[in-house]
Amino acid sequence: MKKLLFTSALATSLILAACGSGEESTESTDSSAEVEQLQEQVAQLEEENAQLQEQLDNTSTAAEEDADSSSDEFADAGNESSRSNPLALGETTEVKVVTYNDDSEELTGKANVTVDNVLRGQEALDAVQMEYLEIEPPAEEGMEWAVFDLKYELTDFESEDYPLMVADDVKIYAEDGSEIEQNEYASVEGEEFPLNELYAGGSASGKVARVVPAGEPFMIKFDDYMEAEAWYQVD
């Protein structure tokens, strides 16, 4: 940029000098030759200026394309599951990962999620019993405990040095579409899904306990409250 300004200013100075020399010595052949020489120099500088501007434009375009390529790298991440098109238990699916670093810069990636091995009713209640604490059935009528396996694998991530916080981000929905509020807490002692920091390539797995409609089909939705979504049907 500095060179562009310099060449433009120099070209202007040479033109003025040429004009001045022409006015003061219109009858001098030496002055005419000098003016012609200066005009050639101005033309050469203008050509160099145009070439430098083209290089600058190409550099800016390349930088913009690199930035767009980086942001689009994970644009196709995700899956087609939904409430009307749920996944089968045990199926591994891809989800899109979005988070922000300490400088509020967006980081994106891909992860695999798997939900499997659902226990419910008395089996689930037995699984959540702790050595020094007895867990009761849900207080709300028509509800029971369910326990299932959750696995999360951070397969690809934009940063190799920034960790992603992963938790058991799971919601439960009844068959009619109502979200089941989780007002009670239980876990499988020593096997619960951990709150974890994962780097690219890392994984976490464990069991999740939730209140579900007793004896009725329900849906498990993995939802990180950003971009990741995966729906599973439990009959």
Image (tube, helix red, strand yellow):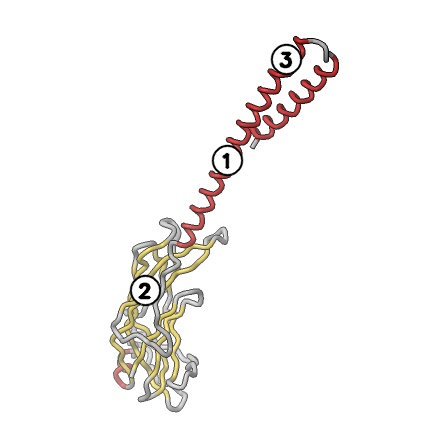
The N terminus is located in which quarter?
top right
* Residue indicated by mark 2: 94
**On the rendered structure, is 41 left or right of 100?**
right
Q: Which mark is residue 5?
A: none
Name the amino acid type tagged 3. Glu
Calculate the distance from the C-alpha at mark 2 to the C-alpha at mark 3. 73 Å
Q: List x then y, in percent, for residue 148.
A: 29, 75
| Position of residue 211 measured from the top left corner of the image (x, y, whole percent) | 37, 81
Check disc 1: other Cα within 10 Å, few if <14, some if 14-19, many if 20+: few
Q: Are marks 3 and 1 in contact (CB under 8 Å)?
A: no
Rendered residue at 50%/39% (across/down)? 57
Quadrant of the frame with the C terminus: bottom left
Mark 2: secondary structure: strand
Q: Can you give x and y, in whole percent of width and height, for residue 88 in the image? A: 27, 76
Q: Looking at the image, is mark 1 or mark 2 nearer the viewer?
A: 1
Label 2 crowd bin: few (<14), some (14–19), many (20+), radius 10 Å: many
Residue closer to the observer: 143 or 108: 108
- Secondary element under disc 3, as helix, strand or loop, is helix
Marks 2 and 3, the one that precedes in the sequence:
3
Residue where numbered disc 3 is placed: 34
Eyeballing the image, is 182 above or below 216? Answer: above
Residue of label 1: 54
Kind of residue at disc 1 = Glu
Q: Nearer the viewer, residue 20 or 212?
A: 20
